[in-house]
Every structure is written in structure tokens, then in C-alpha cells.
Amino acid sequence: MKVFQDKGKTILPRVDSIFLVSRLLIFLGTVWLILHAELTAKEFLPIAILSSTYVITLAIFWHLFRVGKHNLKKAYLAIIIFELVFISTIINFTGGYESDFYLLYYLMVGFSAYLLTMPATLFLAGLTTAIYIVLIIGAINMRDLIDVTMRVGIMWSLPLAISFVSDYVRRSERRLLKLFDTLNQRTSELEKSQAHLEMIYENSRILGGILDLDGVMEGVMKIMGKILAYPASALILIGPGGSFIYRGRNIGGQNNLHLKAVDEKKCSLIKRVAQQSEPVVVMDIVGRNDYVPIRLNTRSVMFIPMIAHGETTGLLLAESPQTGAFTERDSKILSVVARSTAMALDNAHMHRRMEELTITDELTGIYNYRYFAQKLKEEQRRATRYNMPLSLIMLDIDWFKKFNDTYGHEVGNIVLKGITSVVKRCIRDVDIFARYGGEEFVIILPQTPREEVAKIGERIREQIEAATFGGGTDIPELRVTVSVGVTSFPENGKPNEELLSLVDQALYRAKGSGKNSVCVI
């Protein structure tokens, strides 16, 4: 049988405190009654001994209570049993039925009802009643039955009332505490959500200040991977011709910023979301054939379009291994990130276009001398640091001044543009092609040794010699040739700081040897 009430968390005074207060009252009541009772020395001695023992017992209990490292249930039972013996002994020595010490039974049973369960309380009340009847049975007559019945009735009704009330209060307080816990939990969630949103808004604001496309991608993937902590997420951009490209992916906290084309045949859902420009949440993708997740154990997916100037420029997506993992709140939060990302990408693109305007030649569209000089210094430092080859090609259009005088500057501009197109076909994307000035062009070729760059220089010369420029009703087909100078570090045996001077010398020699030739230094 369960004896004690559950202590647990409570808004009522602690059981230990109630128990100590009630026992203190019993002791004070005992002292008061002893002082007002006429006791013989024979009666006073055992009562004094029991009282002293009682005080010592309460002191031990108080110490255990203060230490807080012991289970006090056995101590409770020991004190209740001791009190039953103690009070019964006092009643026996102070007149039995005539003794007023029976009032202490009420304190003992009543306050014990706050501690014990209902069955235990009933058992204690029955045991106390039985002991009291045994003590007074020989001294009562028929006229005393009503008085005895009243005493016993109070001995039962008082603990029952206290037990009922305490049980009701405990049940009520459990509901109240549960409500408090729920309220605290909701408050905590709200505070975390607010802090979360503030962090997202702050990072989104920072995104707007990043003018580098790669920096924007890293910032977005950081928000989705670390702050929002999606198990898997990605940023998809709409490329030329309406194609879709994974520009950034995060799986298990690891970023991958390498480009990867989206297979539109297997991921037609991405195209539909982009076309409708509305967020889409898929609760469970199992059995679907219109989307291939970036993580194998994915069950639910959320797609949020990125919209700039009324047009969808890409998508943000998040995946989870749990079915129905994404709520409307998640959709709203990622929508905030999507809007910020669209604006940041638009700003980065505009910044790049502005940079291109300042570093490109207006006529030919290739880099200007200012950008060439900057990149040459960077590549020279890199070549020295990592001991890598670095080459330069400089080319000059032969007899271009006479050409301009004969056909005019407009035709000359057509030839410059045409030569630019031919050279672009002969070099790599990583090579830096710039207009050096007038009819001179220069190419930086990182990690390119002399043997290879000499072949590239000859290929450029041949391609330009074979090409025709113009060819309309107003402009005849024209041909030009170029002189090409080539040099390479470290094969030329000179410090890479002298590359520009050496390639200029090589070009000078090519022009001096009859033009339309390649000279390597």
C-alpha cells in the first residue's frame, strides 16, 4: 500500500515544513497541558522522559531535513508511531477518559493527513481510535457515550477533511503547475524564436552588404546550414536558357559551392515551383518521381522561390529525414532569407557589372590596361610563391596606322573587335586578355610554360592571318596580320618582374624581323 503523498513540485508549503510545524505544536500543547495538569512525581517522570525523547527525535529530524541528503519517509513513520505511543502514555497517566491530552490526537492525525495517502490516513485514524477506546473503556458509562462518540467522530472527520482538501489542492496545483510549465515552455520557445529571427535578420542584413557573389553564397549556406540547422539545404539559380544550377549545397553542416546542373527530367518539381513563384512544402516525397533529393534519407522538402524585380531568379530548398518536418512558420522564416538572398544576389550582380565597366575596354569588351597591370602583379606574386610558370603574349596589328588612314577609324574599330574574337577562341578562360593600348593587346597565361605559350602565340598569329573582317555592302572583306612577342618565367632566366619589359622586347624583334611573325624570349 502506498503510504505517502507524492512530494514533487508544489506551490504549497513543503510537506517537511508542515510536518515540523505540526510536531512543534504537539510539543507546545504537551508542555501547556503538563503545566496546567496536577501530576504526581510518579506520573511526571515518564512523561518528562517521553517529552525529552520527543524533542531529541524532532531535533534529529530537523538535522536530516537541513542536510537534505536522506530519505525522510522512515523518519516520518517513526515520529508518527512515537507520537501515538507518547500521547497515549500521557493520556493513561493523566486520567484516561478525564484527560484533556486526547486533543493531541487531533493534531497528530490531522497534520499526518496532509502527509499520508487516504488509505494510510484511514488506517492511522482507526488505530488511534482503537488505542483510545482501550485506554478509556474501563472508565466510561452510558452517559459518556455521546461525548466519546463526538471525540472519535472528530478524530475521523478532521483527517478525512484535511485529506480530501489536500488531495483536491494537489490535483488543482498539478494542473496549475502543468499550465505554468506549458506557459514557461511557450515563453522560452517564443524567446528562442525571437532570438532566432533576430539572428536571421542580422545575417540577412549582412548579406545585403556583401558585393561578392561567392561571399553571398557562403553567407546563405551559413544561414541555412548553421543558424536554421537544416539537415540538408541548397541554393538553385536559374541559368541561361532557363536551366537550373545548384550554386550551393549544405549536407550535414558541410558546404559544397561547386556548380552542378539540375536534371530537369528527374526534378520537374523544381521547374514548376519556379514557374508558379510560390512556396511549396512536400510532406513526404516517398513514391514521387518529380524530385531527386540531395540527401538519400530525405522525406520532406520545402521550396522557397527567390524573387527579384518581380522575376524568379532561383530557389532555396531545405530537406529533412522526418515526414512533415516543415511548418508554415518554417516557410515564412525561409521566405525572409529568400528575399534577402535575392536582393543580395542582385546587388552583387550590379556590383560586378559596375566593376566590369571600370575594368573593361569600352570598344572591345576585354580588360583594360588598368586591370591588366593589377592582375599581372597578382600573378607574378603567385608564380614566385608557388614556383609556377607564368607567360605573357603581346601582339600588335601590322601597319594599322596606314590601315586606319585608308579605311577610316570605324573600319579600324571593326578589325579590333574581330581580332578580339579570334584571340578569345585561342586562349583559355583562366587567361587574362587585355587591350594594352591602341592596336596592341596583351595576354597573361598563368601556369603556362614556354613551349606551350609559343604554340599559342603561333596559333593566334595564324588564326588572325586567315580571318577576314568586314564583308558588307559598305565594307569589303579585309585581312590583317599581327606581330607576336612571347616570354615565359622562369624559362627566360629573368625575374618575373621583368616579364612586361621582355615581352615588349620580343614584340619589337618580331616587328623588326618583317612583321607577321612570333618572337620568343
Image (cartoon, rainbow, N blue to C red):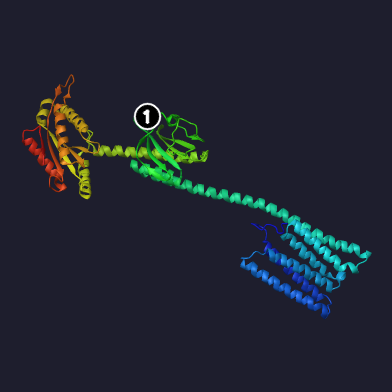
- Residue closer to the observer: 335 or 145: 145
State the quadrant of the N terminus.
bottom right
User: How far from the left and from the top, in percent, is residue 384?
Assistant: 20, 49
x 23%, y 48%: residue: 386
- The single residue placed furthest to the bottom in the displayed view is 41
Left or right? Give the position of 172 relative to 343: right
Left or right? Give the position of 418 relative to 406: right
Residue 369 visible, this angle: no
Q: How many marks?
A: 1
Residue 150 visible, this angle: yes
Residue placed under numbered mark 1 in the picture: 242
Element marked by disc 1? helix
x 49%, y 40%: residue: 321
User: How far from the left and from the top, in percent, is residue 313?
Assistant: 39, 34
x 37%, y 29%: residue: 242
- The single residue placed furthest to the right in the displayed view is 142
Which quadrant would residue 398 be assigned to in this image? top left
User: How far from the left and from the top, in percent, is residue 123?
Assistant: 78, 59
User: How far from the left and from the top, in percent, is residue 39?
Assistant: 83, 77
